[in-house]
Image (cartoon, rainbow, N blue to C red):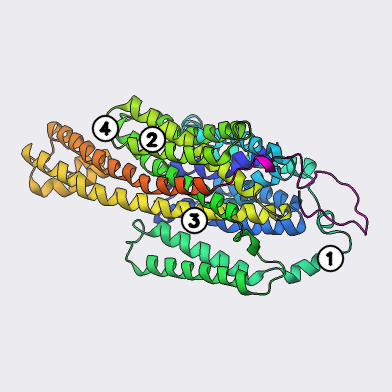
Amino acid sequence: MAIGLGYWAGNAGFAYAAPLLSTINADLGPDPNVQWVALVHPVGLTVGMTIIGRLGDLFGRRWFFICGAFMAMAGTLISALAVNVDMLIGGAMIKALAASTQLSCYYALAELMPAKYRYANVAILNVFQIPGSIFAPAISASITRSAGTWRSVFYLLTAVNTASMLCYFFFYHPPTFHQKHGMREKRITFIKQFDYAGTFLYAVGVVFFLLGMSWGGGKYPWRSPEVISFITIGGVSLIVFVLWECLAPLKEALVPLNLFKNRYWVVSSTLSGISAGVYYAGAIIWPPLVTAFYANGSVMKGAYLACLGGAGIILGGVVGGILAKPLGHQKLQATFTAGAGGALLACLAIKSPDHMALTCCLFFFASFLIGYLADISLTNALLSLKDQREIGAAGGAATSVRTLVAAICQVVYSVVLANKKAQYVPAHVIPAVTSAGLPKSSIKPLLSALSTGSSAAWKAVPGLTPSIQRVAIKANLMGLTQSYQVVWLTTIAFSVIGVMLGLLSPNTEKLLTNKVAARLDNAKIRADDTPDTKV
């Protein structure tokens, strides 16, 4: 229950808040820095998961997870009580770091159960994602509407985080430091030998790289000094980090070098990132698409339709966790789901979004297959470890690889969509509205009104009539249709890479045994006890 509630709140802390940012900004701002509420989540999560995973391997996970739940509770409470955007950002930063423990639960739970149940572990965890991910847009909109304030969303999450913290405190007793290393080992020895330089290089690299990728094309142009310098500093830092881990004589490296020599771990981690990256196409494209074509001005209808992507991903993870072991041939499962899921996404480019039922079905089942792939790939990465004592470091590093690869995919989709909208929307709108009688001097404010959709923007368009407005909206949808079609086709490149990685992924049937990596107990340890090295 502690892990499940934490997993729910860790996902919902971002998923519930993201759809409300414009509402929150209108209440506390306006403040252009409100975008940091969304930016800090992937950054804090990626940095924290690798570090927390390694520290948990060395010192035991219990107090890291309890403190993480406390930080999550504090972060959501600060957000609920925020009086300005800066305070909200502070709460979001605390939540993001706390989420690195909450979302580490898949390996924390996996190490406590027999290896043959690890795919089922994925199914169980995905059930707890249903309220935190599938219905996130609808839940946040519904709570805000019924309570009359966005703060109620954060109060709910504060309660969930509190319950998770109490459950961790009373019921979570994984192996302690001495159970891991024996009574003769001292904590101070591991503290002195820890890889502080590697941790610094990794944190700097991830923070700068992800911020640079997030800023590009949004806050700053891609060619701006800010974006170029941040991406360059981040990329160089990550390269130096890898060299440091490979060449330095480290006793307790942040990321054990043998992970990168394990082909199946590398392939499975990258495949998980590719699948998450393919899904990002839907996460970026789908919400504005349903708002433009299907919502018809209804906030709740748009919110429910926006849930289709999350629903497919989560349900795919549940079904994948149930079927991965009985079906066997995990390599074929990964290859098939990568190819079929990518093909369904690409098929969205064939039909116009006007066909709502077909479009929704294609997108849902594509997300379903990709969710199936993403979660069995992450489980494959953990099953393929040669030393299960490193499951935390391996799990954290795998998640970081997943986030970095997905971030690159997200940038590609965002750039393609922005460029094609700038090309196709004016190409359709301008001839249509000028033929309908709109003065050429009104074209710029008209395009702005189509982008924002606000009534104030429409009123600011000189010479606009209801008939011209209808013509403009119809032409805008034609331009958007072409723009979205190009992005759907862009996913083919990543899907092909996914199929190739699927062919290189492992069959794990021989690894699905009754062995357990760690035991949930408080057994006393004798001085001559030695820990197990493998499961």
Local packing at callout 2 (Cα closer than 10 Å; few below 14, some 14-19, many 20+) is many
Q: Amino acid at mark 3?
A: Leu
* Relative horizontal placement of residue 531, taking residue 342 as reference (left or right): right
* Relative horizontal placement of residue 487, taking residue 268 as reference (left or right): left
What is the magenta range? Answer: 506-535
The residue indicated by pointer 3 is 404
Q: CA distance from mark 1 to mark 3?
A: 35 Å
Of residues 311 and 119, the one nearer the viewer is 119
Task: Tell me if residue 510 is in the magenta stretch.
Answer: yes
Of residues 80 and 3, the one nearer the viewer is 3
In percent of width and height, residue 27 lies at: 43, 45
The disc placed on residue 186 is 1
Identify the secondary structure beneath mark 3.
helix
The residue indicated by pointer 4 is 352
Q: CA distance from mark 3 to mark 2?
A: 24 Å
Q: Main secondary structure of the magenta part?
A: loop
Give the position of the N terminus as an image quadrant.
Answer: top right
